[in-house]
Image (cartoon, rainbow, N blue to C red):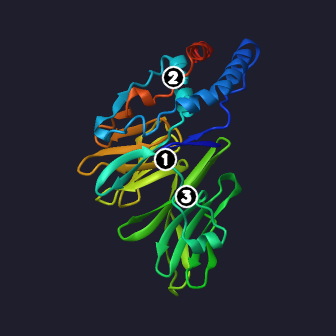
Amino acid sequence: MREFRGSATFRLRGEMSFPSAFSGRNARVVESVNQQMNGLLPLLVLAAPTVNTLQVPELSKWQSIPVPPKSKSGEMKAWIYAAMDAPVEWQVRMEAGKLIARPAGKPDPLPAPLIALGYSAKYSKVQPIEGGWLVGVNRGEWGGELVRVWSPYKEAVKVSDHQIVDFFYRKGRLHAIEGLSHLGSSRGAVIRIGLSKTAFHFNASKVIELPAAPRAVTVRRDGTVILILDGSVAALDHRNRLTILLPKLHEFSSNSCAIAPGTTRLYIGMRQYVAELDLISRKLRYLVPSAAYLNRLPEDEERRIREMYRHG
């Protein structure tokens, strides 16, 4: 993965590639699309908007982009490909009591003792605790672990083999979402993390198994946990009952989520868009600051993709 840096950071794939499981004429079309799109990558990098040239407005002023209907599968595929290869990835977060969306940059640097132990901000989530940190290491298909690092001794003690995606507090107790999506399989769980009876070692226990790998999490004031899963949105109530709020979410590498203060609107940061889901009406919208931020395929390639998938 390459990075282009301006005032904001844009993550770009080293190559743009379309599916290769085709034969005959479609295979030749796919090969042509791949070759020409890879040749256009430098142009897309140069054309990527930065905060210097295009100011990011408040989320309330973002534009809603219509999603092609399922009946028009060619248009849907072109929309998906354009979003998947967009140069900008949005991240949502609360800042000074206000919900904001900004281009995703590098992860926050780790505390010096963790760096000294060889931990990487790219693969680690850190939760400060008394006397040190809990570190969730997630290397994707290469595995992961949850460890406790003692600050005075700079010693790491393994807690479990969970692949931590993020930590969160619920009713004053520390929890985490963990899981993996890889090669067609997707699994995950919500876990509870706490001290053992000796108050010396931490332990991690499963609260509930999830139907797919989790991407992001936030907690409502009433304690309901909102989960962005691999392709859907779910809610976990105070009795640990899971409800699917949205069975189908086009999520392009979702990385964060937050609820706008005083509303029932959930915002999900991802590549190309910030998705807005009303938790009551279940209405979903895909937002961009302006049309200038939309990644568009060259017209001839878009036509070819539409034709390729015209019949599904």
Residue linked to disc 3:
178
Look at the numbered disc 2 and give the secondary structure of its residue: helix
Percent across and percent down for residue 29 are 69, 15
Residue linked to disc 1:
104
- Give, as a three-letter code, the residue at label 3: Glu
Q: Is residue 3 above or below residue 204?
A: above
Sooner in the amino-acid sequence: mark 1 or mark 3: 1
Q: Is residue 110 above or below residue 296?
A: below
For residue 265, which quarter of the picture?
A: top left
Look at the numbered disc 1 and give the secondary structure of its residue: loop
Percent across and percent down for residue 130 are 46, 80
CA separation, marks 2 and 1? 26 Å
Q: Residue furthest left?
A: 262
Q: Residue furthest bottom?
A: 198
For the residue carrying disc 2, how many other residues have a C-alpha within 10 Å: few (<14), some (14-19), or many (20+)? Answer: some
Residue 165: image tag: none
Q: Residue at x 62, y 62 (%)?
A: 120
Residue 76: image tag: 2
Sooner in the amino-acid sequence: mark 2 or mark 3: 2
